[in-house]
Amino acid sequence: MHRRAWAPFLFVLVVMAGCARCGRDAASPGGATTSVARRLPRDAQAAVVINDLGSLGEKLARFQNLKVASFLAQLQNASSAEGYVSAVMRQVGVDLRSQQAMEAAGIDPKRGAGAAFLGENSVVSVLGVKEREALQRTFGGFARSRLGATEEKASKVDGGTLVTFGRAGAQPLLGILFLERESLALLGAGPSIQRLPELAAMAEDRSLAHEPVLAASLARLPAERDFHVWLPGGGGLVPVGTVQGVTLTGRIDERAVTVRADAPWPDSEAALTALDPKDTPGLVGFLPADSFLVARFRGDPARLDGVWPYLVGPQVTRAVQQAGFDMKTELLDNLKPGMVLGLSLAPNVNLGAGMPELDLRRTNPFRFVHLVALSEAKDAERAKATLDKVPGVAGGFGAKVETADVQGQRLYLTSYRAGEGAHFALGPAGKLVLAAPRARLEGTLASLGHTGGEGPVAADLRDAGANAALTVVLDLRRLSEAVKALPSEAWGIGGFAIKATTVRWLDATDDLRAVTLALSRKEKALQAEVSLRLTPAPTASTTTAPATP
């Protein structure tokens, strides 16, 4: 079962990487992660840093108490997540969940660790050294038992001592370069070993410790972080002609795993003003209570002139432009900040046909979800005149919009080849409503005559994106409850058994509370935050004794 389980953990050992000042080292230029960054090259395609391996390992150990972790472990024929991970750690030779175990293996977890991705599957790492002899024994044991590398050689190189492990007459498989006068070691596997002496002798100004874009991003991001990742612009995951680079930071606690991103904006700062949050009307309270996904935009819609074509797609953009409809003056300039959107699971959804195609031209999304979106117009009469122009534009992108009067209320009803589309109307006090199906539109219009409620966002999720312009909350618990409430017929033939299996899956993941997204700007940089909210698991006693090779 665990025959190849060591492979991901070899990668972990090789890929623990650092890049520049972060966390506590911001106030201490000579700190551990700065030392790590000093040994990693600025021309790396990507880099990642862990501030404290012991702290991070103990935090990650909590995840084995999640029900979803045990469920996944059982799929690997293990009795529990704790048992599976413990078996893997024994094969690795060091328990990465335990600070004491790492120290016994010769690793100094408090010094941090780092790795740089140099391209062509080449990765080099930096690791804190507690005791050189113990660390050499740890990797030697791993190399012999897992890689079949029985030959060990040591040689003096510029900057330290290089120890390699390999098979007789073959190229080394694993190499460790112990630096002189520093409690650090450089680590590489296969072809990466030949880069280790070069990094040991590298000039300081060529290192990640002197990367200005990275340093500026880290200064803008919160100091509380467990790790960060640097993706330079101009290659790899960040193409040429976009941004200078993207910095990601991560924070793990009992209730959430949060990743934040910062990217210097290449255009003028004025282009980011759409992400300045404004005072907004309380429209969230009018969204349906069963909404499992809620989005709110608190920026100025008039600033979205250059963004809307990316949101609606090329087909709609062409139709709007060909019809001579000026999106900015006709619509965006007349909207107040505070647009909201809610998605609910369709109660009559049919899941028996399998997963739908993610193509609006072939699959009608409103067979699966119901939509309600709300905004408020600055000038109601002007908004009414704009809505009257939409039927003439809709034909250009394959839709048909007809009007209907219901109890004195003008409705604009949309249909297209795949079926019923999103309908819209102008409600009381200039409130614009976009909804599907029609029953959702009529129900929302009726609710606008009353005072809005608290809204569908649960109390424990309302802190998400408090200062952001765009916030999205995906309530996994509410979505799970909605799926469980579906009748057996929704699952097609054999629906009773399929539903029972699905419910077991959902029960196994009910400690995953929600996913939240927040988009904002700070100075002349775009920032994003994605958080996986957790329901804390009961504290369980776990054995994290030092693993033996």
Image (cartoon, rainbow, N blue to C red):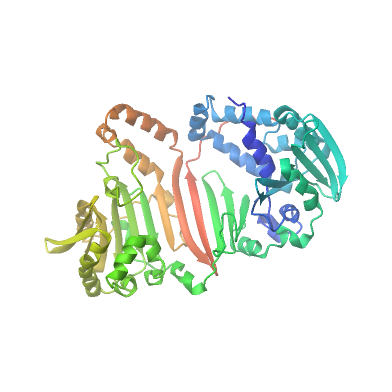
Task: Name the residue at 52% across, 24% down.
Answer: 77
Residue placed most toward the observer, 261 or 315: 315
Residue 161 position in % (x across, y down) = 85, 44
Residue drawn at the location 30% of the way across and 37% of the way down: 353
Left or right of 81? Residue 311 is left
Q: How many marks?
A: 0
Front residue of this view, candidates 116 and 239: 239
Q: Quadrant of residue 330?
A: bottom left
Task: Please provide percent x and percent y for residue 531.
Answer: 49, 50
Q: Quadrant of residue 487?
A: top left
Where is 9 relative to 440, above or below?
Answer: above
Residue 352 x, y percent position in the rendering: 29, 35
Q: Quadrant of the C terminus?
A: top right
Judge by depth and name the residue closer to the eye, 172 or 251.
172
Identify whether 394 is placed above or below 259: below
Q: Is residue 354 left or right of residue 131?
A: left
Residue at 47 percent of width and 62 percent of height: 467
User: Does residue 159 lie above or below 212 as drawn?
Assistant: above
Q: Is residue 157 left or right of residue 539?
A: right
